[in-house]
Image: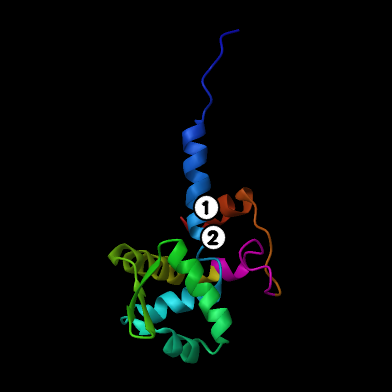
Amino acid sequence: MPQTAPLVTDLARDRATMLARFFRGLDDPTRVLILELLLSGEKPVSELVELVGSSQGRVSNHLACLRHCGYVTTRREGRWIYYRLADERVRALLRIAQELMADHAQALLSCAVVSPDLPGATVHTLEEDDQAASADG
C-alpha cells in the first residue's frame, strides 16, 4: 500500500501552536482591558493601575507579559515608564476582535468551552450547529 503524505505538515502544526500561544497572551480580561485602554494612547503605569483598579504588582505582571509577547512597548522619561501599543497591527487586531465579538456575542456567552463560568452555557456539537444553520437558511 503506498504511503501518503500527512494531511497536515509539521510546519503547519508548529505554526498553529505558535498562533495559539500568541492568542493565549490575550487570554486574560485584565490584559485585554489594558490593551483597550492603550487604544487612546500611551499611559504611565500609575495611570493604568488606577484605571484597571488592580494592584501595581498585578498590573505590572500583565504589562510584562504584554511587552514580552510583543503587544506593547515602552519608553522611559525620568523615573516614569510609559506603555503604548507596539504597532498598528495590535490596534487592528483589537478592532477586528471587537467586531467579531459583537457579531457572535450570544454564541460566545452560550458556549461552555469559552464561557465555562456562565450558568446555562453548554458544549455544542457540530450537528447542532449544522441544524441551526439549516434552520436559518
Residue in the foreground of this view, choosing between 115 and 5: 5
Q: Dot 1: few (<14), some (14–19), or many (≥20) neighbours within 10 Å?
A: few
Report the span colored magenta: 107-118
> Can you tell which mark lies on residue 24?
2
Q: Which residue is mark 1?
A: 20
What secondary structure characterizes most of the magenta part?
loop
> In this rendering, does residue 135 appear at all?
yes
Q: Amino acid at mark 1?
A: Ala
Pointers 1 and 2 in contact (C-beta within 8 Å): yes
Vertical side of 58 occupied by 127: above or below: above
Q: Most extreme residue toward the front, as rendered?
A: 78
Picture coordinates of residue 29 (x, y %)? 54, 75
Vertical side of 127 occupied by 112: above or below: below
In the structure shown, which secondary structural element does the residue marked by tag 1 occupy?
Answer: helix
User: Residue sitting at 51 percent across and 32 percent down?
Assistant: 10
| CA separation in Å, label 1 and label 2 | 6 Å
Which part of the image, by quadrant, shows the N terminus?
top right
User: Residue sitting at 40 percent across and 62 percent down?
Assistant: 70
Residue 76 falls in image quadrant: bottom left
**In the picture provided, is 44 more to the left or to the right than 125?**
left
Q: Dot 2: few (<14), some (14–19), or many (≥20) neighbours within 10 Å?
A: few
Within the magenta stretch, is there residue 114? Answer: yes
Q: Most extreme residue toward the left, as rendered?
A: 88
Picture coordinates of residue 13 (x, y %)? 52, 38
In the structure shown, which secondary structural element does the residue marked by tag 2 occupy?
Answer: helix
